[in-house]
Image: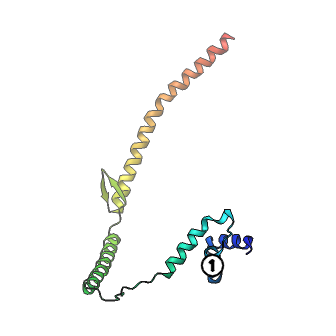
Amino acid sequence: MDYQKIKKLTDKYFEGNTSLQEEQELTRFFNEAKNIPPELIYLKSFFQFIKTEQSKTFNKPVLLNQSKHKLLYRLSGIAAVILIAAFIIFSKSKSENKIIYAYVNGKPIYEKRKAEKYSKLALYRISENLNTGTENLNYLNKLNKIEQLIKKGEK
Protein backbone atom coordinates (compact mmCIF):
# COMPACT_ATOMS: atom_id res chain seq x y z
CA MET A 1 0.00 0.00 0.00
CA ASP A 2 1.22 3.49 -0.81
CA TYR A 3 1.78 5.19 2.56
CA GLN A 4 1.91 8.67 1.05
CA LYS A 5 -1.55 8.09 -0.41
CA ILE A 6 -2.82 6.94 3.01
CA LYS A 7 -1.27 10.01 4.66
CA LYS A 8 -3.02 12.30 2.14
CA LEU A 9 -6.31 10.44 2.64
CA THR A 10 -6.11 10.82 6.44
CA ASP A 11 -5.47 14.55 6.06
CA LYS A 12 -8.39 14.78 3.67
CA TYR A 13 -10.53 12.68 6.08
CA PHE A 14 -9.97 15.01 9.03
CA GLU A 15 -10.79 18.02 6.85
CA GLY A 16 -14.12 16.34 5.99
CA ASN A 17 -13.44 16.08 2.26
CA THR A 18 -13.34 12.31 1.67
CA SER A 19 -15.86 10.22 -0.22
CA LEU A 20 -17.42 7.06 1.21
CA GLN A 21 -15.08 4.91 -0.88
CA GLU A 22 -12.02 6.73 0.46
CA GLU A 23 -13.28 6.34 4.03
CA GLN A 24 -13.81 2.61 3.46
CA GLU A 25 -10.29 2.36 2.03
CA LEU A 26 -8.86 4.02 5.15
CA THR A 27 -10.88 1.77 7.46
CA ARG A 28 -9.81 -1.32 5.52
CA PHE A 29 -6.15 -0.26 5.58
CA PHE A 30 -6.01 0.42 9.33
CA ASN A 31 -7.91 -2.78 10.17
CA GLU A 32 -6.03 -5.16 7.86
CA ALA A 33 -2.52 -3.72 7.38
CA LYS A 34 0.29 -5.22 9.45
CA ASN A 35 3.07 -2.74 8.73
CA ILE A 36 1.63 0.67 9.56
CA PRO A 37 4.14 3.54 9.57
CA PRO A 38 4.95 4.86 13.08
CA GLU A 39 3.57 8.35 12.30
CA LEU A 40 0.15 6.82 11.50
CA ILE A 41 -0.05 4.10 14.17
CA TYR A 42 -2.18 6.27 16.45
CA LEU A 43 -4.99 6.16 13.83
CA LYS A 44 -5.30 2.37 13.96
CA SER A 45 -7.37 2.35 17.17
CA PHE A 46 -9.46 5.26 15.87
CA PHE A 47 -10.49 3.43 12.70
CA GLN A 48 -11.04 0.17 14.59
CA PHE A 49 -13.41 2.05 16.90
CA ILE A 50 -15.29 3.45 13.90
CA LYS A 51 -15.64 -0.03 12.42
CA THR A 52 -17.06 -1.51 15.65
CA GLU A 53 -19.47 1.40 16.07
CA GLN A 54 -20.73 1.02 12.51
CA SER A 55 -21.53 -2.62 13.13
CA LYS A 56 -23.78 -1.81 16.10
CA THR A 57 -27.51 -1.69 15.55
CA PHE A 58 -30.29 0.07 17.41
CA ASN A 59 -33.09 -2.33 18.30
CA LYS A 60 -35.50 -0.19 20.31
CA PRO A 61 -38.61 0.98 18.49
CA VAL A 62 -38.77 4.67 17.70
CA LEU A 63 -42.12 6.23 18.53
CA LEU A 64 -43.05 9.13 16.31
CA ASN A 65 -45.87 11.60 16.99
CA GLN A 66 -47.11 9.78 20.07
CA SER A 67 -46.58 12.51 22.64
CA LYS A 68 -48.86 12.41 25.70
CA HIS A 69 -48.88 16.17 25.87
CA LYS A 70 -49.44 16.93 22.19
CA LEU A 71 -52.54 19.04 22.86
CA LEU A 72 -50.80 20.95 25.64
CA TYR A 73 -47.88 21.78 23.33
CA ARG A 74 -50.20 23.05 20.61
CA LEU A 75 -52.23 25.17 23.01
CA SER A 76 -49.13 26.68 24.60
CA GLY A 77 -47.79 27.53 21.13
CA ILE A 78 -51.05 29.23 20.17
CA ALA A 79 -51.11 31.16 23.46
CA ALA A 80 -47.52 32.33 22.91
CA VAL A 81 -48.35 33.61 19.41
CA ILE A 82 -51.40 35.48 20.74
CA LEU A 83 -49.38 37.08 23.55
CA ILE A 84 -46.62 38.20 21.20
CA ALA A 85 -49.13 39.66 18.73
CA ALA A 86 -50.98 41.51 21.52
CA PHE A 87 -47.71 42.91 22.85
CA ILE A 88 -46.67 44.19 19.43
CA ILE A 89 -50.07 45.78 18.72
CA PHE A 90 -50.40 47.54 22.07
CA SER A 91 -46.79 48.68 22.31
CA LYS A 92 -46.99 50.38 18.90
CA SER A 93 -50.20 52.25 19.69
CA LYS A 94 -48.85 53.67 22.95
CA SER A 95 -45.48 54.74 21.55
CA GLU A 96 -46.99 56.56 18.55
CA ASN A 97 -49.10 58.93 20.70
CA LYS A 98 -46.45 60.00 23.18
CA ILE A 99 -43.23 61.56 21.99
CA ILE A 100 -40.89 62.75 24.71
CA TYR A 101 -39.34 66.08 23.70
CA ALA A 102 -37.38 66.77 26.88
CA TYR A 103 -36.86 65.87 30.53
CA VAL A 104 -37.17 68.50 33.25
CA ASN A 105 -36.20 67.46 36.78
CA GLY A 106 -36.48 63.82 35.71
CA LYS A 107 -40.03 64.21 34.34
CA PRO A 108 -40.74 63.77 30.62
CA ILE A 109 -42.22 66.67 28.63
CA TYR A 110 -44.63 65.53 25.93
CA GLU A 111 -45.59 68.96 24.54
CA LYS A 112 -43.28 70.50 21.96
CA ARG A 113 -43.90 74.13 22.99
CA LYS A 114 -43.20 73.46 26.65
CA ALA A 115 -39.97 71.71 25.72
CA GLU A 116 -38.90 74.70 23.60
CA LYS A 117 -39.72 77.07 26.47
CA TYR A 118 -37.59 75.08 28.93
CA SER A 119 -34.76 74.84 26.39
CA LYS A 120 -34.71 78.61 25.82
CA LEU A 121 -34.75 79.22 29.58
CA ALA A 122 -31.82 76.84 30.11
CA LEU A 123 -29.80 78.50 27.32
CA TYR A 124 -30.51 81.95 28.77
CA ARG A 125 -29.27 80.88 32.20
CA ILE A 126 -26.11 79.40 30.68
CA SER A 127 -25.36 82.61 28.79
CA GLU A 128 -25.90 84.68 31.97
CA ASN A 129 -23.39 82.55 33.84
CA LEU A 130 -20.95 82.80 30.98
CA ASN A 131 -21.20 86.61 30.94
CA THR A 132 -20.58 86.93 34.70
CA GLY A 133 -17.69 84.52 34.47
CA THR A 134 -15.91 86.56 31.79
CA GLU A 135 -16.03 89.87 33.73
CA ASN A 136 -13.04 88.80 35.84
CA LEU A 137 -11.04 88.07 32.69
CA ASN A 138 -10.78 91.82 32.02
CA TYR A 139 -8.86 92.28 35.30
CA LEU A 140 -6.59 89.41 34.38
CA ASN A 141 -5.89 91.02 31.01
CA LYS A 142 -4.88 94.31 32.73
CA LEU A 143 -2.54 92.40 35.07
CA ASN A 144 -0.87 90.71 32.09
CA LYS A 145 -0.23 94.09 30.43
CA ILE A 146 1.33 95.44 33.65
CA GLU A 147 3.53 92.35 33.98
CA GLN A 148 4.76 92.78 30.41
CA LEU A 149 5.61 96.46 31.05
CA ILE A 150 7.60 95.49 34.17
CA LYS A 151 9.55 92.85 32.25
CA LYS A 152 10.43 95.37 29.50
CA GLY A 153 11.65 97.87 32.12
CA GLU A 154 13.96 95.29 33.77
CA LYS A 155 15.83 94.60 30.53
Q: Nearer the viewer, residue 148 or 102?
A: 102
Residue at the image point whose x is 74% and y is 70% from the top = 4
The residue under label 1 is which amino acid type? Arg
Would residue 17 be visible to someone looking at this image? no
Quickly name the residue at label 1: 28
Q: Residues within 10 Å of mark 1 (few under 14, many from 20)?
A: some
In the displayed structure, does residue 123 sit left or right of residue 24?
left
Secondary structure beneath dot 1 equals helix
Residue at the image point whose x is 63% and y is 73% from the top = 30
Residue at the image point whose x is 61% and y is 68% from the top = 43
Q: Return the x and y of residue 93 as percentages of the image width and height.
A: 32, 75
Would residue 51 be visible to someone looking at this image? yes
Q: Nearer the viewer, residue 88 or 5?
A: 5
- How is this picture coloured? rainbow
Answer with the quarter of the image where residue 98 lies.
Answer: bottom left
Q: Return the x and y of residue 91 as percentages of the image width and height.
A: 32, 72
